[in-house]
């Protein structure tokens, strides 16, 4: 049970620290011990799954607030008292991100269509 508890402590520390050194400092374990955990196949899988879950949660939080960010940028662009250079910078930011997001959405749509076509091809004719 102690090993499992230490494993959970190491996992939590890895998720909340940027480096192995910081993780070692936070847990009181040596860096070599942290690397030993990272070489363990089962621990590594658990760590990767936890990182993915954190990324998904963070992405959801960001997506939930995109409209607020867009509104703030548009507010800066439209405010008459905003200096011209700030308005230009905000406009540039809005355009660049708009193009990037549009491109990503299109790529995801195309990927979905390709996956659907492949699945239909694998199913074969009825």
Image (spheres, rainbow, N blue to C red):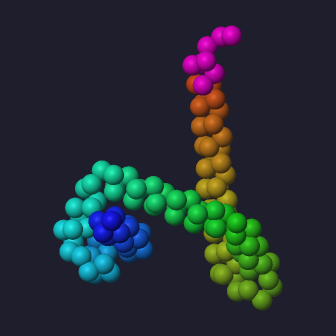
In the depicted view, which residue is nearer to us: 21 or 92?
Answer: 21
> Could you tell me residue 114's position as x and y percent?
60, 30
Tell me if residue 122 is in the magenta stretch: yes
Above or below, 38 relative to 17: above
> Could you tell me residue 32's position as x and y percent?
18, 68
Task: Count how many numbered circles sit on residues in the image.
Answer: 0
> Could you tell me residue 71's position as x and y percent?
76, 73
**Residue occupying the point 38% across, 52% down:** 45
Task: Magenta stretch: give its range.
Answer: 119-126
Mark yes or no: residue 77 visible: no
Above or below, 90 relative to 104: below
Mark yes or no: residue 114 visible: yes
In the depicted view, which residue is nearer to us: 68 or 88?
Answer: 68
Residue reaching furthest top?
A: 126
**Residue occupying the point 65% across, 44% down:** 106
Decide whether the magenta segment is chiefly helix, strand or loop.
helix
What quarter of the picture does the C terminus occupy?
top right
**Residue occupying the point 62% across, 43% down:** 108
In the depicted view, which residue is nearer to us: 61 or 29?
Answer: 29
What quarter of the picture does the N terminus occupy?
bottom left
């Amino acid at each position: 049970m102690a090993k499992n508890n230490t494993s959970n402590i190491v996992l939590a520390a890895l998720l909340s620290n940027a480096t192995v050194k910081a993780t070692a400092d936070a847990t009181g374990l040596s860096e070599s011990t942290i690397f030993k955990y990272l070489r363990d196949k089962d621990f590594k899988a658990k760590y990767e799954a936890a990182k993915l879950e954190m990324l998904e949660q963070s992405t959801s939080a960001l997506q939930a607030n995109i409209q607020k960010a867009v509104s703030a940028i548009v507010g800066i662009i439209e405010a008459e008292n905003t200096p011209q250079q700030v308005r230009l910078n905000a406009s540039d930011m809005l355009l660049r991100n708009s193009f990037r997001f549009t491109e990503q959405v299109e790529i995801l749509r195309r990927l979905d269509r390709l996956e659907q076509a492949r699945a239909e091809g694998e199913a074969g004719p009825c």
